[in-house]
Amino acid sequence: MIVTTKQLFDHAYGKYAVGGYNINNAEQIMGLFEGCIESKAPFIIQISRGARGYTDKRMLEGMIRSADEIFPDAIFAVHLDHGTEEAAMDCINSGFYSSVMIDASHESFDENIAITKRVVDAAHAKGISVEAELGQLGGVEEDIVVSEESANLTVPSEAKEFIERSGCDSLACAFGTSHGAYKFTTSQGLHFEVIEEITKLVPGFPIVMHGSSSVPQDEVERINAAGGKLGGAKGVAEEDISKAAPMGVTKVNIDTDGRLVWCRVHREMFRDQPEVFDLRPAGKVFMSEYAKYIVHKNEVLGSAGQVDDLRKTL
Ligand code: G3H
Ligand code: 13P
Ligand code: ZN
């Protein structure tokens, strides 16, 4: 069942975080739904602009509609990840999305507010909620590359002003994470003091953590043992994620970890079964391994086991 992102956040805030999982194809959608059904977890399925252009946005949307039919017990929201104003407006007008992200974090403070407010006005008129971003994460984000040194942590007082002036419903804040498989080359861990300060200033307001993949080291080792070259890949400690969730970090975005599962499954298959040329054996293993990853991650987020209680509030 597709619900509003607000319904998910209202239930989760201060107790657990909802996983915001990026998907690009049918295998990822199947693994995600299977994992969330098994762990009885609500979730947010998110589509980046890159994902919308990979096959065709209608293909992805169609597959999500089908997954909703195949898994009638699933409770989830559909979200645009890192949208431009144009992409956000397209999603708002499509009538399919529960929420959109407008990412104008690379603009000046005032321009970020102005762009976000335009999206908020259009979205709220249709009952859709809006995630905005303030501060800059390190790493690669769509076509923008930000080095770790030039990543700017969110200033809590600015976050409060930004939320009040833009009217956004959740805010992606920079407190030490970065996108991709190489986080923390020069520094280590999350800035919990930033999270604490923000939630003190805007109690009850959902904070979003981007760049939350944990980059499991066993996964990296298996990839490298099968011919990969991911030396030095490192992610967010799972204890840090579990600690941040009850502090008001209500949505936790994960993309890279799913790519690592895909990479490991396919590299090992090509190494160990060079005679196989059918795409389905590896696809089957990937769906099941990704589902296992999702089950584990929902435990870390605290979203596992929440669906029945959430259902009573809908
Ligand atoms: O934050 C970015 C997400 O990982 C999406 O990545 O734009 O390559 O689909 P993508
Ligand atoms: P990761 O690269 O850590 O998976 O972050 C994904 C993300 O923030 C999507 O918006
Ligand atoms: Zn992101």
Image: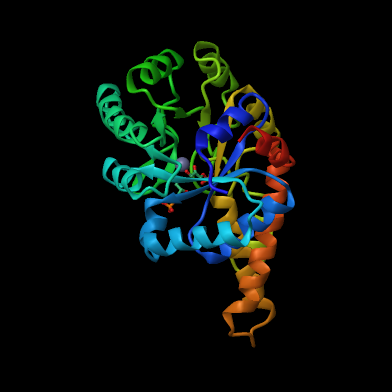
In the image, residue 31 above or below residue 91:
below
Residue 224: % across, % down: 63, 62
Q: Quadrant of residue 127?
A: top left
From the viewer's side, name the closer residue of 197 and 176: 197
Q: Is residue 189 left or right of residue 52?
A: right
For image coordinates 73% across by 48% down, the residue present is 39
The image's colouring method is rainbow
State the count of labels. 0
Residue 230 appearing in the image? no
The residue closer to the viewer here, 206 or 66, is 66
Residue at x 56%, y 56% (from the top left corner): 68
* Residue 275 position (above or below residue 176): below
Q: Is residue 211 left or right of residue 226?
A: left
Percent position of residue 5, x then y: 51, 37
**Residue 288 in the image, given as x and y percentages of width and height:** 69, 64
Work out whether residue 263 or residue 286 is closer to the camera in this orientation and state it.
Answer: 286
Name, please, the residue furthest toward the bottom: 275
**Residue 10 appears in the figure:** yes
Q: Is residue 307 above or below residue 52?
A: above
Quadrant showing the C terminus: top right
Q: Nearer the viewer, residue 65 or 81?
A: 65
The x and y percentages for residue 215 are 62, 48
